[in-house]
Amino acid sequence: MFVSSVTGKSIIVLCTLFFVSFSYGKNLDIKGLHLGKTYEEIKENLPCRDFSERRSEKTKVLYVYITECGRYEDKESYVISYDIGKKVFLISRRIRFSITPNREKLKKQLIQKYGEADTTNSLSISDNMCWGDCKATTIGISNGGKEESLIVSFINYEDTLTFDLHEPLLKEINDKINVQKTKEKLELMQLKASNIEL
């Protein structure tokens, strides 16, 4: 899955927690769903009610929360990822077509909504368009750094269109919070373990 980010940010540190507000340069969205909103705000506006929620761990120190809406085989499904403060930094939408659609019509609709793509590439497995902070790679398009981007890919071998709207900076802040909280928990455990009877 490809990811992305956002422009213009202010970070306030308070009691080791990070509160973030962003002003999005391109105001990118997926069917009206925007990054930086809370999990509850996004969830109530998803077009399905078949939710699967879990915590995804990279390590015991680094983790995010994931909610899936719809199943892989459904005509349309969503995945959202959010941080410990319930700020959404990834929204993915997947559309499965029952018949191969007209790609030129799809492309025109995307340009009408988002404008001309900042980056495009065509590979044997997918045709890709990206708005925002984008970087073409040998396997498609990925986010170029820390700014917001929307990557739309037509998967050739299964007639599927995917949308990935991502903000890496929010994920980075989430990881910092997790590291800090784990450090504080360890320090408390060490202090408790250091109590001895004399």
Image: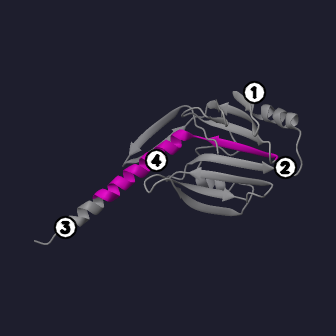
55 left or right of 196 in image = right
Asked if residue 173 lies in the magenta stretch, the reply is yes
Q: Residues within 10 Å of mark 4 (few under 14, many from 20)?
A: some
Along the polypeptide, which appears first: circle 4 or circle 2? 2
Along the polypeptide, which appears first: circle 3 or circle 2? 2
Asked if residue 9 lies in the magenta stretch, the reply is no
Q: Quadrant of residue 34?
A: top right
The answer for how far apart the CA atoms under marks 1 and 3 are is: 64 Å
Quarter of the rendering occupied by the N terminus: top right
Residue 97 is tagged as 2
* Residue drawn where x is 19% and y is 67% of the image: 195
The answer for how far apart the CA atoms under marks 1 and 4 are is: 33 Å
* Residue drawn where x is 54% and y is 53% of the image: 86
In the image, what residue type sits under mark 1? Glu
Along the polypeptide, which appears first: circle 1 or circle 3? 1
Residues shaded magenta = 159-187
Element type where label 3 sits in the image: loop
Residue 184, given in percent of the width and then of the height, sits at 33, 55
Q: Is residue 66 positioned above or below 8 on the image?
A: below
**Residue at label 3?**
195
The chief SS type of the magenta part is: helix
* Residue drawn where x is 58% and y is 32% of the image: 144
Element type where label 2 sits in the image: loop
**Residue at label 4?**
175
Q: Is residue 93 positioned above or below 112 on the image?
A: below
Task: Please tell me which residue lies in front, 28 or 138.
Answer: 138
**Residue at label 1?**
116
